[in-house]
Amino acid sequence: MRRSASANMPRYKLTIAYDGTSFHGWQKQHPPGEEPLRTVQGVMEEAIVAVVREPVHLVGASRTDSGVHARGQAAAFDTQNEIPMDRLPRAVNSRLPDDVQVLSAEIVAGDFNPISDAIAKGYRYTIAHSTINGGEMPLFDRHLVAWTVYTLDAARMNEAAQHFVGERDFASFTRKHHGRESTVRTVHECKVEAVDQFRINIDISGGGFLYNMVRIIAGTLLEVGRGKLEPGAIAGIIEARDRASAGPTMPPEGLCLMWVKYPGSAQPA
Protein backbone atom coordinates (compact mmCIF):
# COMPACT_ATOMS: atom_id res chain seq x y z
CA MET A 1 0.00 0.00 0.00
CA ARG A 2 1.68 3.18 -1.18
CA ARG A 3 1.73 6.43 0.74
CA SER A 4 -0.13 9.17 -1.13
CA ALA A 5 1.47 12.41 -2.28
CA SER A 6 0.82 14.18 1.00
CA ALA A 7 2.80 12.61 3.84
CA ASN A 8 0.38 14.19 6.30
CA MET A 9 -2.68 12.36 5.04
CA PRO A 10 -4.12 10.19 7.81
CA ARG A 11 -4.43 6.46 7.22
CA TYR A 12 -7.54 4.75 8.54
CA LYS A 13 -7.81 1.07 9.38
CA LEU A 14 -11.27 -0.50 9.25
CA THR A 15 -12.50 -3.81 10.58
CA ILE A 16 -15.23 -5.08 8.28
CA ALA A 17 -17.79 -7.89 8.35
CA TYR A 18 -19.76 -9.14 5.37
CA ASP A 19 -21.99 -11.89 4.09
CA GLY A 20 -20.18 -12.89 0.92
CA THR A 21 -23.14 -14.64 -0.71
CA SER A 22 -23.93 -11.90 -3.22
CA PHE A 23 -20.37 -10.65 -3.75
CA HIS A 24 -17.84 -11.71 -6.37
CA GLY A 25 -15.21 -11.77 -3.66
CA TRP A 26 -13.29 -8.92 -2.07
CA GLN A 27 -11.25 -7.54 -4.97
CA LYS A 28 -12.70 -5.15 -7.55
CA GLN A 29 -13.28 -6.73 -10.95
CA HIS A 30 -14.25 -5.03 -14.19
CA PRO A 31 -14.44 -7.51 -17.11
CA PRO A 32 -13.75 -5.86 -20.50
CA GLY A 33 -16.92 -4.63 -22.14
CA GLU A 34 -19.08 -5.44 -19.12
CA GLU A 35 -20.34 -3.74 -16.01
CA PRO A 36 -18.09 -4.00 -12.92
CA LEU A 37 -18.85 -7.04 -10.79
CA ARG A 38 -20.26 -6.50 -7.32
CA THR A 39 -17.35 -6.86 -4.89
CA VAL A 40 -16.81 -5.90 -1.27
CA GLN A 41 -13.91 -3.61 -2.12
CA GLY A 42 -15.98 -1.84 -4.77
CA VAL A 43 -19.01 -1.35 -2.54
CA MET A 44 -16.85 -0.19 0.36
CA GLU A 45 -14.93 2.34 -1.73
CA GLU A 46 -18.16 3.86 -3.04
CA ALA A 47 -19.44 4.33 0.50
CA ILE A 48 -16.17 5.80 1.78
CA VAL A 49 -15.95 8.22 -1.16
CA ALA A 50 -19.45 9.43 -0.33
CA VAL A 51 -18.23 10.22 3.20
CA VAL A 52 -14.79 11.76 2.53
CA ARG A 53 -15.74 13.31 -0.84
CA GLU A 54 -12.51 12.36 -2.60
CA PRO A 55 -11.21 9.26 -4.41
CA VAL A 56 -9.83 6.52 -2.15
CA HIS A 57 -8.18 3.16 -2.63
CA LEU A 58 -9.14 0.62 0.02
CA VAL A 59 -6.62 -2.21 0.55
CA GLY A 60 -7.84 -5.38 2.26
CA ALA A 61 -5.78 -7.89 4.22
CA SER A 62 -7.36 -10.91 2.51
CA ARG A 63 -8.75 -11.30 -1.01
CA THR A 64 -11.64 -13.54 -0.07
CA ASP A 65 -13.27 -15.43 -2.94
CA SER A 66 -16.85 -15.28 -4.21
CA GLY A 67 -19.25 -16.51 -1.57
CA VAL A 68 -16.72 -16.38 1.30
CA HIS A 69 -17.68 -14.40 4.39
CA ALA A 70 -15.81 -12.27 6.92
CA ARG A 71 -16.30 -11.28 10.53
CA GLY A 72 -12.96 -9.53 10.88
CA GLN A 73 -11.56 -8.39 7.54
CA ALA A 74 -8.99 -5.60 7.93
CA ALA A 75 -8.57 -2.83 5.38
CA ALA A 76 -7.00 0.62 5.16
CA PHE A 77 -7.25 3.81 3.12
CA ASP A 78 -5.80 7.32 3.01
CA THR A 79 -7.73 10.57 2.91
CA GLN A 80 -6.95 14.24 3.29
CA ASN A 81 -9.91 14.59 5.64
CA GLU A 82 -9.70 13.94 9.36
CA ILE A 83 -12.85 12.17 10.51
CA PRO A 84 -13.77 11.57 14.17
CA MET A 85 -13.46 7.88 14.97
CA ASP A 86 -16.86 7.78 16.65
CA ARG A 87 -18.47 9.02 13.44
CA LEU A 88 -16.60 7.17 10.70
CA PRO A 89 -18.15 3.66 11.06
CA ARG A 90 -21.66 5.09 11.38
CA ALA A 91 -21.19 7.42 8.42
CA VAL A 92 -19.87 4.69 6.13
CA ASN A 93 -22.45 2.14 7.29
CA SER A 94 -25.28 4.51 6.45
CA ARG A 95 -24.16 4.30 2.82
CA LEU A 96 -23.59 0.53 2.68
CA PRO A 97 -25.98 -2.26 1.69
CA ASP A 98 -27.17 -4.57 4.45
CA ASP A 99 -24.72 -7.40 3.67
CA VAL A 100 -21.57 -5.49 4.66
CA GLN A 101 -20.75 -3.45 7.76
CA VAL A 102 -17.86 -1.53 9.29
CA LEU A 103 -17.35 -2.77 12.84
CA SER A 104 -14.65 -0.34 13.96
CA ALA A 105 -12.16 2.26 12.74
CA GLU A 106 -8.86 3.64 13.94
CA ILE A 107 -6.03 5.88 12.72
CA VAL A 108 -2.83 3.92 12.10
CA ALA A 109 0.75 4.75 11.18
CA GLY A 110 1.30 6.14 7.70
CA ASP A 111 3.31 3.10 6.65
CA PHE A 112 0.75 0.57 7.89
CA ASN A 113 0.07 -2.12 5.28
CA PRO A 114 -2.89 -4.41 5.99
CA ILE A 115 -1.40 -7.19 3.85
CA SER A 116 2.31 -7.31 4.64
CA ASP A 117 1.96 -6.21 8.29
CA ALA A 118 -0.44 -9.03 9.17
CA ILE A 119 1.25 -11.68 11.33
CA ALA A 120 -1.65 -14.14 11.48
CA LYS A 121 -5.11 -14.78 10.08
CA GLY A 122 -7.84 -16.97 11.46
CA TYR A 123 -10.46 -18.78 9.39
CA ARG A 124 -13.43 -20.93 10.34
CA TYR A 125 -15.04 -23.54 8.11
CA THR A 126 -18.47 -24.73 9.25
CA ILE A 127 -20.04 -27.96 8.08
CA ALA A 128 -23.57 -29.20 8.70
CA HIS A 129 -23.70 -32.95 8.34
CA SER A 130 -25.80 -36.13 8.44
CA THR A 131 -29.27 -37.05 7.25
CA ILE A 132 -30.04 -39.39 10.16
CA ASN A 133 -31.68 -38.79 13.54
CA GLY A 134 -33.04 -35.40 12.56
CA GLY A 135 -30.13 -34.08 10.51
CA GLU A 136 -31.36 -32.04 7.55
CA MET A 137 -29.92 -29.75 4.91
CA PRO A 138 -29.68 -26.22 6.40
CA LEU A 139 -32.40 -23.82 5.36
CA PHE A 140 -32.22 -20.42 7.06
CA ASP A 141 -28.43 -20.25 7.22
CA ARG A 142 -27.73 -22.30 4.11
CA HIS A 143 -25.48 -19.56 2.68
CA LEU A 144 -23.26 -19.60 5.78
CA VAL A 145 -22.47 -23.31 6.14
CA ALA A 146 -21.49 -26.20 3.90
CA TRP A 147 -23.50 -29.40 4.01
CA THR A 148 -22.75 -33.08 3.54
CA VAL A 149 -25.00 -36.12 3.75
CA TYR A 150 -22.27 -38.03 5.57
CA THR A 151 -22.23 -38.37 9.34
CA LEU A 152 -18.88 -36.96 10.49
CA ASP A 153 -16.70 -37.91 13.45
CA ALA A 154 -15.29 -34.67 14.87
CA ALA A 155 -12.78 -36.47 17.10
CA ARG A 156 -11.20 -38.27 14.13
CA MET A 157 -11.10 -35.01 12.21
CA ASN A 158 -9.43 -33.18 15.10
CA GLU A 159 -6.79 -35.91 15.38
CA ALA A 160 -6.06 -35.52 11.68
CA ALA A 161 -6.02 -31.72 11.92
CA GLN A 162 -2.95 -31.75 14.16
CA HIS A 163 -0.81 -32.92 11.23
CA PHE A 164 -1.29 -29.51 9.60
CA VAL A 165 0.24 -27.56 12.50
CA GLY A 166 3.75 -26.23 11.90
CA GLU A 167 5.75 -25.21 8.85
CA ARG A 168 4.74 -27.46 5.97
CA ASP A 169 4.82 -27.57 2.19
CA PHE A 170 1.12 -27.33 1.35
CA ALA A 171 1.44 -28.03 -2.39
CA SER A 172 -1.19 -30.77 -2.00
CA PHE A 173 -3.65 -28.19 -0.69
CA THR A 174 -3.81 -25.59 -3.45
CA ARG A 175 -4.64 -25.59 -7.15
CA LYS A 176 -1.96 -26.95 -9.48
CA HIS A 177 -1.22 -23.66 -11.25
CA HIS A 178 -1.10 -21.54 -8.11
CA GLY A 179 1.48 -19.02 -9.35
CA ARG A 180 3.28 -18.76 -6.01
CA GLU A 181 7.05 -19.02 -5.69
CA SER A 182 6.70 -21.17 -2.58
CA THR A 183 3.94 -23.39 -1.21
CA VAL A 184 5.52 -23.52 2.25
CA ARG A 185 3.28 -22.00 4.90
CA THR A 186 3.08 -22.07 8.70
CA VAL A 187 -0.13 -23.13 10.43
CA HIS A 188 -0.32 -22.05 14.07
CA GLU A 189 -3.42 -23.98 15.06
CA CYS A 190 -5.91 -26.33 13.45
CA LYS A 191 -8.73 -27.79 15.48
CA VAL A 192 -12.09 -29.41 14.85
CA GLU A 193 -14.97 -29.12 17.30
CA ALA A 194 -18.55 -30.35 17.27
CA VAL A 195 -20.88 -27.40 17.77
CA ASP A 196 -23.83 -29.76 18.22
CA GLN A 197 -24.91 -33.15 16.88
CA PHE A 198 -25.08 -31.87 13.31
CA ARG A 199 -22.56 -29.01 13.13
CA ILE A 200 -18.76 -29.00 13.06
CA ASN A 201 -16.36 -26.04 13.09
CA ILE A 202 -12.87 -26.27 11.66
CA ASP A 203 -10.74 -23.39 13.01
CA ILE A 204 -7.35 -22.76 11.42
CA SER A 205 -4.90 -19.93 11.89
CA GLY A 206 -1.53 -19.19 10.37
CA GLY A 207 0.81 -16.64 8.92
CA GLY A 208 -0.68 -16.94 5.43
CA PHE A 209 -2.63 -19.27 3.19
CA LEU A 210 -2.50 -20.46 -0.40
CA TYR A 211 -5.40 -20.18 -2.85
CA ASN A 212 -8.21 -22.53 -1.70
CA MET A 213 -5.91 -23.97 0.98
CA VAL A 214 -8.44 -23.82 3.82
CA ARG A 215 -11.25 -25.21 1.67
CA ILE A 216 -9.09 -28.14 0.53
CA ILE A 217 -7.97 -28.84 4.10
CA ALA A 218 -11.65 -28.85 5.09
CA GLY A 219 -12.47 -31.26 2.26
CA THR A 220 -9.65 -33.57 3.29
CA LEU A 221 -10.75 -33.52 6.93
CA LEU A 222 -14.28 -34.33 5.78
CA GLU A 223 -12.90 -37.49 4.14
CA VAL A 224 -11.38 -38.42 7.51
CA GLY A 225 -14.61 -37.62 9.34
CA ARG A 226 -16.69 -39.88 7.10
CA GLY A 227 -14.17 -42.73 7.48
CA LYS A 228 -12.74 -42.71 3.96
CA LEU A 229 -9.29 -41.66 5.21
CA GLU A 230 -7.46 -42.48 8.43
CA PRO A 231 -6.25 -39.53 10.54
CA GLY A 232 -2.63 -40.58 10.02
CA ALA A 233 -3.01 -40.38 6.25
CA ILE A 234 -2.66 -36.58 6.39
CA ALA A 235 1.11 -36.81 6.88
CA GLY A 236 1.48 -38.76 3.63
CA ILE A 237 -0.79 -36.38 1.73
CA ILE A 238 1.33 -33.43 2.83
CA GLU A 239 4.50 -35.30 1.88
CA ALA A 240 3.11 -36.14 -1.58
CA ARG A 241 2.96 -32.46 -2.60
CA ASP A 242 0.30 -33.48 -5.10
CA ARG A 243 -3.15 -31.89 -5.30
CA ALA A 244 -4.68 -35.17 -6.50
CA SER A 245 -3.78 -36.86 -3.21
CA ALA A 246 -5.88 -34.50 -1.06
CA GLY A 247 -9.64 -34.26 -0.61
CA PRO A 248 -12.15 -32.11 -2.53
CA THR A 249 -12.32 -28.34 -2.47
CA MET A 250 -15.25 -27.51 -0.21
CA PRO A 251 -17.77 -24.85 -1.34
CA PRO A 252 -17.20 -21.21 -0.37
CA GLU A 253 -20.28 -20.67 1.80
CA GLY A 254 -18.81 -22.57 4.76
CA LEU A 255 -15.72 -20.35 4.98
CA CYS A 256 -15.38 -17.19 7.07
CA LEU A 257 -12.39 -14.93 7.74
CA MET A 258 -12.65 -14.50 11.51
CA TRP A 259 -9.77 -12.17 12.31
CA VAL A 260 -6.47 -10.65 11.20
CA LYS A 261 -3.74 -10.04 13.79
CA TYR A 262 -1.09 -7.30 13.70
CA PRO A 263 1.98 -6.63 15.87
CA GLY A 264 1.01 -5.13 19.19
CA SER A 265 -2.64 -6.11 18.95
CA ALA A 266 -4.30 -8.52 21.37
CA GLN A 267 -4.73 -12.12 20.30
CA PRO A 268 -8.19 -12.30 18.66
CA ALA A 269 -10.80 -14.39 20.44
Image (cartoon, rainbow, N blue to C red):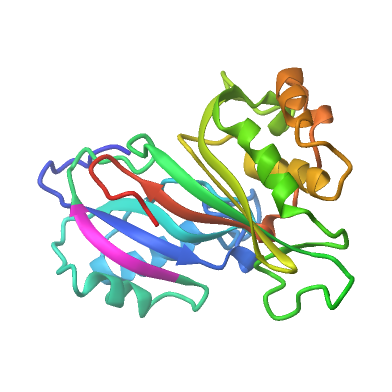
Q: Which residues are magenta?
A: 101-107
Please state the horizontal and vertical placement of residue 218, each as a whole percent of the image.
70, 46
263 within the magenta span: no
Q: Outermost residue, left direction?
A: 8
In this rendering, is residue 52 above or below 165? Answer: below
Quarter holding the N terminus?
A: top left
Number of marks: 0
Q: Foreground residue, 181 or 37?
A: 181
In this rendering, is residue 44 above or below 31? Answer: below
Whether residue 227 sits left or right of residue 19 in the image: it is right
Please state the horizontal and vertical placement of residue 3, each as a whole percent of the image.
23, 39
Residue at the spot x=87%, y=58% of the render? 150
Whether residue 173 sits left or right of residue 264 in the image: it is right
Residue at the spot x=72%, y=72% of the render? 142
Work out whether residue 211 can be spotted. Answer: no
Magenta stretch: dominant SS? Answer: strand
Q: Foreground residue, 230 or 18?
A: 230
Query: Which corner quadrant of the image does residue 92 belong to?
Result: bottom left
Please state the horizontal and vertical placement of residue 35, each as a whole percent of the image.
61, 61
Please state the horizontal and vertical placement of residue 146, each as a whole percent of the image.
73, 61
